[in-house]
Amino acid sequence: MRASQFEIPREGGNGQAEQAHRRLNSLVETQSARIADLLHDDVSQVLASAHITLDDVAGDVPLSAQLRLLQVRQHLHDVAEQLRCVSHTLHPGIVEDLGIVDAITFTSRVFTRRTSIPMVMSVKMDPPCSPAAGALVYRFVHEALANIGQHARATSAAIALERAGSDIVCIISDNGLGFDVTATLAPDATRHLGLRLIQARLEAAGGALDIVSVAGQGTRLRAVVPSEI
């Protein structure tokens, strides 16, 4: 599969519509950050309290019950991990802490350690983008890597990130199984919901998502994001 470079035309819109989109995106990001903080702080404290209670109870029950309590603790740990992932997806604070380039570099290294799939990176980001644009790009990368790790059965992958005029272009490719793009992006599809949400976010921000996938030859995702949103 050959990944071609091209520019996606953007429909002209009036200034009021663009401003409305930006205000909406800002409100969504603010609300997402609040929900993420709630999951990370308040809910995590409740789970931590549950662990402490289980420790207290474990000393007063027979061994057979202690083993069952260990299973409960593992379930609580799994819930905490899932909440962490949800919180991270809602509001990727890593972009604010590290910047978009270092955040994606770090995430790609974690991906390779977890999956053993080698990753080639090419980054040309000068000047940098707005925090909102960076968060959107990061969400795209996070979702794409998750799909590669879970479904693609790839042996190699690549990320290319660059400024193209007033846009950011991010291309992620792999040499995996590929998939039916039309079926995946259909409104009633039950798989790859995250990918459809990313597409909707990109389009709402004035960007676009292009997917090329060939059975047995891999997948190429190309996201275009305005650098100021």
Image (cartoon, rainbow, N blue to C red):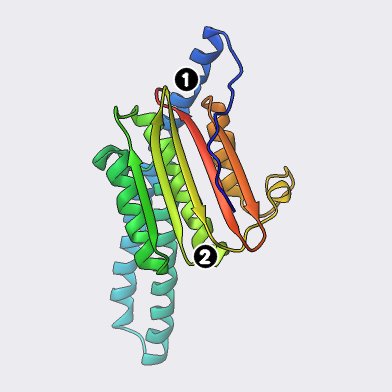
Q: Quadrant of the N terminus?
A: bottom right
Q: Residue at x 39, y 58 (%)?
A: 119
Mark 1 / mark 2, whichever is N-terminal: 1
Q: Residue at x 33, y 77 (%)?
A: 57
Q: Position of residue 54 (x, y in %)?
A: 34, 73
Amino acid type of the residue tagged 2 in the rendering: Ala
Q: Residue at x 53, y 57 (%)?
A: 147
Report the residue marked by disc 1. 22
Q: Quadrant of the C terminus?
A: top left
Mark 2 Cα-neighbour bin, 10 Å: few <14, some 14–19, many ≥20:
many
Q: Is residue 183 left or right of residue 20?
A: right
Q: Nearer the viewer, residue 101 or 194?
A: 101
Is residue 10 visible to the viewer in this orientation of the structure? yes
Residue placed farthest to the top in the image? 15
Q: Is residue 180 left or right of residue 10?
A: right
Is residue 41 visible to the viewer in this orientation of the structure? no
When asked about the image quadrant of residue 76, the answer is bottom left
Q: Is residue 93 left or right of residue 212?
A: left
Choose mark 1 or mark 2, whichever is in front: 2
Q: Nearer the viewer, residue 213 or 91?
A: 213
Q: Secondary structure at mark 1?
A: helix
Q: Residue at x 50, y 52 (%)?
A: 173
Q: Secondary structure at mark 2?
A: loop
Amino acid type of the residue tagged 1 in the rendering: Arg
Q: How many marks?
A: 2
On screen, residue 201 above or below 212: above
Report the residue marked by disc 2. 154
